[in-house]
Amino acid sequence: RRDRRARRRPRGRQPMTDGHTLAALALRRLGITNVGIHIGDGTLGWPPDAPYDAIIITAGAPKVPDKLLTQLSPNRGRLVIPIGSLEDQRLFLYEQRGDQLTEQHLGPVRFVPLVGRGAWGATTENGHLA
């Protein structure tokens, strides 16, 4: 039997209420009750529960949002994030060990844009980047 509960209380950050609703419904259907979802700017992370052992970003950013790096656990905290232009991105793994941050290139990728203060900025009403 597979245990569907996460070991710790992970957090999800959704930029739109529609995404929040869909994620909450999916988690409820799977019987996962120990995950928190917050609506807001994902480039800012979620400081109240930091530090994190792992942060995974599933949208491409022009650079690593500094706020996410500051929320990594100093004891091997990891951040996986696609970095690059809107058309050409590379997946990176950042790992914090004490005061040392390492960067490892994992390969070429293409994700939707990460929208927020620490990335591509806002979108217009029709969904295009402003």
Image (cartoon, rainbow, N blue to C red):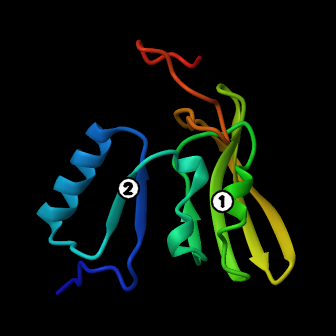
Assess whether mark 2 and mark 1 are in contact (beta carbons under 8 angstroms).
no
Quadrant of the drawing holding the C terminus: top right
How many C-alpha atoms fall within 10 Å of the one at disc 1: few (<14), some, or many (≥20)? Answer: many
Residue pictured at 31% horizontal, 70% vertical: 35
Give the quadrant of residue 89: top right
The amino acid type of the residue labelled 2 equals His
Q: Nearer the viewer, residue 89 or 27?
A: 27
Q: Position of residue 57 (x, y in %)?
A: 55, 53
The amino acid type of the residue labelled 1 equals Leu
Q: Which mark is residue 68?
A: 1
Q: Which mark is residue 57?
A: none
Q: Which residue is mark 2?
A: 38
Is 113 above or below relative to 35? above
Give the quadrant of residue 27: bottom left
Whether residue 59 sits left or right of residue 94 in the image: it is: left
**Secondary structure category for the residue under label 1:** helix
Extreme front residue here? 48
Extreme right residue here? 100
Give the quadrant of residue 73: bottom right
Q: Position of residue 2 (x, y in %)?
A: 22, 83
Q: Position of residue 70 (x, y in %)?
A: 72, 66
Is 129 above or below relative to 16? above
Whether residue 18 sits left or right of residue 111 in the image: it is: left
Q: First in sequence, mark 1 or 2: give its number.
A: 2
What is the CA distance from the residue labelled 1 to the residue labelled 2? 15 Å
How many C-alpha atoms fall within 10 Å of the one at disc 2: few (<14), some, or many (≥20)? Answer: some
**Secondary structure category for the residue under label 2:** strand
Quadrant of the drawing holding the N terminus: bottom left
Q: Position of residue 4 (x, y in %)?
A: 23, 78
Residue pictured at 87% horizontal, 76% vertical: 100
Is 110 above or below relative to 27? above
